[in-house]
Amino acid sequence: MRYENADLSYKEFESFSLEGESFKASTLTCAKFSNCVLKGIDFSEGFLAEAVFEDYILENCNFQHANLQRCKFIKCNIKNSCFSSAYMGQVLFEECVIDDCDFSASQIPDGEFIKTTLQYTSFEGSYVKSGVFESAFLKDVNLSFADLRKTSFRNTVFENITDKDALFYGKNPGVRRNLPKTGTNLRATVLTDPHPL
């Protein structure tokens, strides 16, 4: 099947494994991926608005410069994948594990990370304004130079977070809890306020 530069809108991909294929510059509007294993897949420059990824494994995949507006990632395991410079307005990650991924320079306004674990992941220089991290766990995450104004961190645990020159309204979460100031690492902190920033 031809995947690259194709219109695969509304297509359902269910219970299969795919490795090393390219969906580059393809349109996958409202496509649904469920119970799949995707490894080394290139989604770069694709249009995936309102696509749903549910109960799947995604490893070594490339979403660079893709449009993921209003995409839903539910109960997914995402590892060593690149979302750099992607547009992800109103994206939802719910009950996911995101490990060793790159969201640098991405646009994630109003994005939600609910009951999601993020570790060894970079949001450096990203626009995450008005985002929501709720009941999340962030470990070894780089938020340096990110725009986090109006971002909520309700019931979120921070462990070893780098936030050098990140933009916050008011004080950053670490200072609010008498932790080190901006530019150092936040360690083992739980934030319970709905909008601490």
Image (cartoon, rainbow, N blue to C red):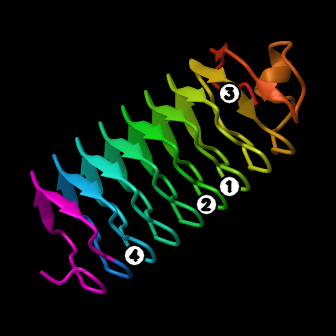
Query: Which residue is the site of mark 1?
Result: 127
Report, in whole angstroms, how far the alpha carbon at label 3 lies from the one at label 4.
33 Å
Report, in whole angstroms, how far the alpha carbon at label 1 lies from the one at label 4.
20 Å
Report, in whole angstroms, how far the alpha carbon at label 4 lies from the one at label 2.
14 Å
Compared to 185, does 61 lie above or below? below
Query: Which residue is the site of mark 4?
Result: 46
**Picture coordinates of residue 82 (x, y %)?**
50, 59
**Picture coordinates of residue 20 (x, y %)?**
28, 68
**Picture coordinates of residue 171 (x, y %)?**
86, 29
At mark 4, the secondary structure is loop
Which of the two discs, 2 and 1, labels the residue nearer the N terminus? 2
Tell me the crowding category of disc 1: few under 14, some 14 to 19, or many 20 or more residues within 10 angstroms, Cα based.
many
Mark toward the viewer: 1 or 4: 4
Which segment is the magenta one?
1-23
Q: Please tell me whether residue 22 belongs to the stretch shown in magenta.
A: yes
Dots 1, 4 in contact, CB < 8 A: no
Amino acid type at image mark 4: Gly
Magenta-colored segment: predominant secondary structure: loop
The reply, left or right, for residue 65 in relation to residue 145 is left
Residue shown at the point (37%, 56%) measured from the top left: 71
Which of the two discs, 3 and 2, labels the residue nearer the N terminus? 2
Report, in whole angstroms, how far the alpha carbon at label 3 lies from the one at label 2.
22 Å
Dots 4, 2 in contact, CB < 8 A: no
